[in-house]
Image (cartoon, grey):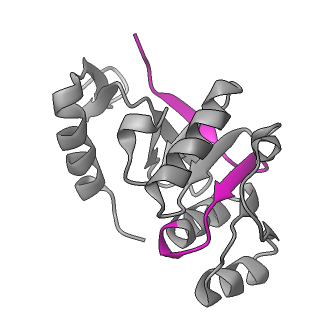
Amino acid sequence: MTFPVSMDLRNRSILLVGGGAPALAKLRFLVRARALVTMVAEYVDAETAAFAAQHRVEIAQRRFIPADGIGQDLAFIATGDRAADLMAARIIHSNGGQVNVVDQPEVSTFILAELPGNDSSVMILPTESVVALEQGDDDAGRGRFVHWELTPATRKVARRLFNALLPSH
């Protein structure tokens, strides 16, 4: 069974593999969360490079190597090359790391949901299940989390619905 975890990314070591538009979207999110980001990318587009420089993000302009994932709290893979993404994800995961591969929930070990009103915290959602906040009325006037296990056939649909609910950045 899997459960959601809330994580404050402030000052957490995060690896971001990739240097194009998908990586930039993750980088913007991670900078806003005040994470300590290390980027690894053979190619970094001008917009991503400028944003990274503005926010003092370290960029290693080269191919991903297995040692890149060591000591990182989380890893995000966003190269746009499906084979390269899969290879990096497998290496990081085999070393005990948690990895999010952009648009590939089937090889990700988690997906994200930002927590409202807190720029540095996220909800880490395992890719085997969906968690929703059900409207409700407990003693404190809050809703409650409801957890559903997913079959492989419904994961992709759930991921699309989940992404549609997130505000665009």
Q: Can you tell which quarter of the image residue 131 is in? A: top left
Seen in the image, is 61 located left or right of residue 115? Answer: right
Q: Which residues are magenta?
A: 1-22
Q: Is residue 12 visible?
A: no
Determine the residue located farthest toward the top in the rendered image. 1
Is 134 drawn above or below residue 25 in the view shown? above
In the rendered structure, does residue 2 fall within the stretch colored magenta?
A: yes
**Coordinates of residue 149 in the picture (x, y in percent):** 26, 18
User: Is residue 5 covered in magenta?
Assistant: yes
Q: Locate the C terminus by quadrant.
A: bottom left
Q: Quadrant of residue 132?
A: top left
Percent x, y of residue 100: 51, 44
Find residue 6 and report its horizontal and vertical position in percent. Answer: 54, 34
Can residue 47 be seen here?
Answer: yes
Q: Nearer the viewer, residue 98 or 65?
A: 65
Q: Residue at x 82, y 37 (%)?
A: 71
Q: Is residue 68 above or below residue 131?
A: below
Q: Residue at x 78, y 71 (%)?
A: 61
Whether residue 136 sits left or right of residue 53 in the image: it is left
Say which of 88 and 163 sits in front.
88
Task: Tell me: 149 left or right of 18.
Answer: left
Residue 12 position, x and y percent, is 76, 45
| Residue at point 61%, 64% (across, down) | 18
Task: Indicate whether 50 appears above or below 94.
Answer: below
Residue at image location 30% in from the left, 25% down from the top: 144
